[in-house]
Image (spheres, helix red, strand yellow):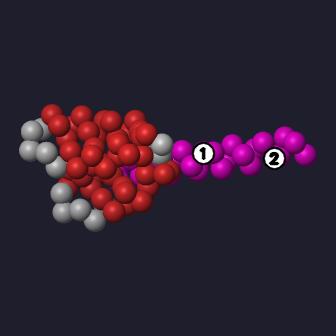
Amino acid sequence: MKSDKAVQPLINALKDEDWSVPESAAESLREICTVKSKKQLEDLLESDHEFSANTAFEILYEIEKEEKSRVVLFKDEKIFKT
């Protein structure tokens, strides 16, 4: 998938010294990251670069929240089918 290949360059851009580059990269990552990106983001949590680690945490939190809401949704669907 195209977005999976775009994740690593954006992760690298989080450490750019020009303040606008990391902000733009973080926003793009928030838009394109999916469950498939979790491993790359989890690795980023170990980073000494605070902005990168915080961004990864925020995105992983949103992915997890979305996954949990889908589980609840599918459980509700099963109830209606029986």
- Depth check: 11 or 61 in front? 11
> Looking at the image, which residue is at 17% across and 37% down?
21
Q: Secondary structure at mark 2?
A: helix
Check residue 53 for magenta coloring: no
Which residue is pictured at 60% across the width and 45% down the height?
69
Across and down, in percent, residue 72 comes to: 67, 47
Residue that badge 1 annotates: 69
Along the polypeptide, which appears first: circle 2 or circle 1? 1
The numbered mark at residue 59 is: none
- Give the residue at mark 2: 78
29 sits to left or right of 22? right
Say what amino acid the circle numbered 1 marks.
Ser
Q: Position of residue 14 (x, y in %)?
A: 21, 46
Extent of the magenta region: 57-82
Magenta highlight: main SS: helix
- Residue type at numbered disc 2: Lys
Pinpoint residue 13: horizontal percent, then vertical percent: 21, 45
